[in-house]
Amino acid sequence: MTSDNLPTTTPRGNAGPKAGARILVVEDEPVNRMIADGMLQQFGIEHDMAEDGAQAIALITNNRYSLIFMDVQMPDMNGYETTRRIRAWEKTEGRPKTPIVALTAYAAKGDRERCISAGMDDYMSKPIIRDAFLDKIEQWILPRSESPATKEAEPTTDESGGVLDAAAIAALREAMRSVPGGLEEVLNGYLESLDRLVVAMRDGSKADDDESIRRAAHSLKSNSAAVGALELSDLCRRLEVIAKDGSAKERESLIVGIAAQAEGVRAAVRTMLGV
């Protein structure tokens, strides 16, 4: 395997849901966990969710998994360090390597090399899209004959006045169809994260804390893309870069723009929820 080309063929056995496949998703953002959980329930695949690296390691030492999806950007212990610890534990215990697919909302230069160096096997960009998610599962653990059927997409309608991407909302509704609370639960979770993360950006700006701003921007970028708030997601992407390399004036201007865009997104989501 080269550093430029991650595997594209199915490298492991034919374990599918009927053969006892189990997936672990490691993701610190609650909205992304809800979405992944809903999709895996729809696929009929046994799974566990971990919200940080320490929880992931505890689950892995007590369970057998066919595949792990690993968020790269997590506080305290990031996905790279978590993966290195998993690989060290597997070697010590004489366990076979479990495939690990990196999840990242920021595809920076060198990320693929870092994934391989840490012991990861594959790479997937966020937000988590149903078909891309299923493709990775099929690639690593499901034979094509056992994979969940992909339904023909329903026509999309814009329920948000153009603030949210209609196709993204339709895909999310379908992915969460079999989950109690469904799309409503995801959107309520998103509203909570929206308010919390905008406040975190403002507080970080007042404290001149670039790292706090960057973390909040990274999280809101991923969450917003997942619910189709694409313009807000792009503003957060720009702030994530500016917080590290830009001026305080540029940073503050973007935070003001994000807060203004967040107001429109919040109103659109509340309209969809009927509140």
Image (cartoon, rainbow, N blue to C red):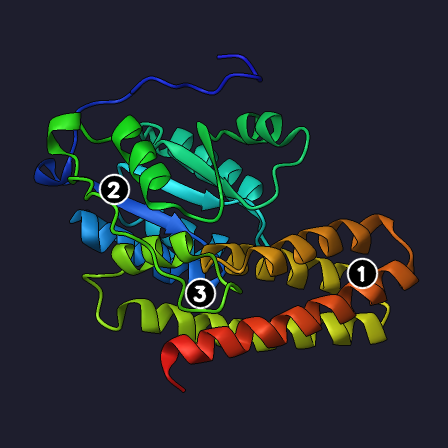
Q: Nearer the viewer, residue 263 or 128?
A: 263
**Residue type pointed to by label 2:** Arg
Quadrant (top left, top right, bottom left, bottom right) of the C terminus: bottom left
Q: Position of residue 44 (x, y in %)?
A: 15, 49
CA separation in Å, label 2 and label 1? 39 Å
Q: Residue at x 20, y 40 (%)?
A: 150
Q: Earlier in the sequence, mark 2 or mark 3?
A: 3
Q: Is residue 215 left or right of residue 24?
A: right
x and y percent of residue 187 in the render? 41, 71
Q: Kindly give the residue lying farthest to the bottom in the view shown.
A: 275
Mark 2 or 1, nearer chain start: 2
Label 1 crowd (10 A; few <14 / some 14-19 / many >=20): some
- Note whether residue 142 is visible: yes
Q: Nearer the viewer, mark 2 or mark 1?
A: 1
The amino acid at mark 3 is: Pro
230 or 202: which is nearer to us? 230
Q: Secondary structure at mark 1?
A: helix
Tally of marks: 3
Dot label at residue 210: 1
Residue at (28% x, 44% y) in the render: 23
**Residue under numbered circle 3:** 30
Callout 1 amino acid: Asp
Specify the label residue 64 is tagged with.
Answer: 2
- Please say if 110 is above or below 261: above
The image quarter containing residue 250 is bottom right
For this view, does 254 lie left or right of residue 61?
right
**Residue 94 image-quadrant placement:** top left
Dot 3 lies on which element? helix
Query: For the view shown, which residue lies furthest in the top direction?
Result: 1
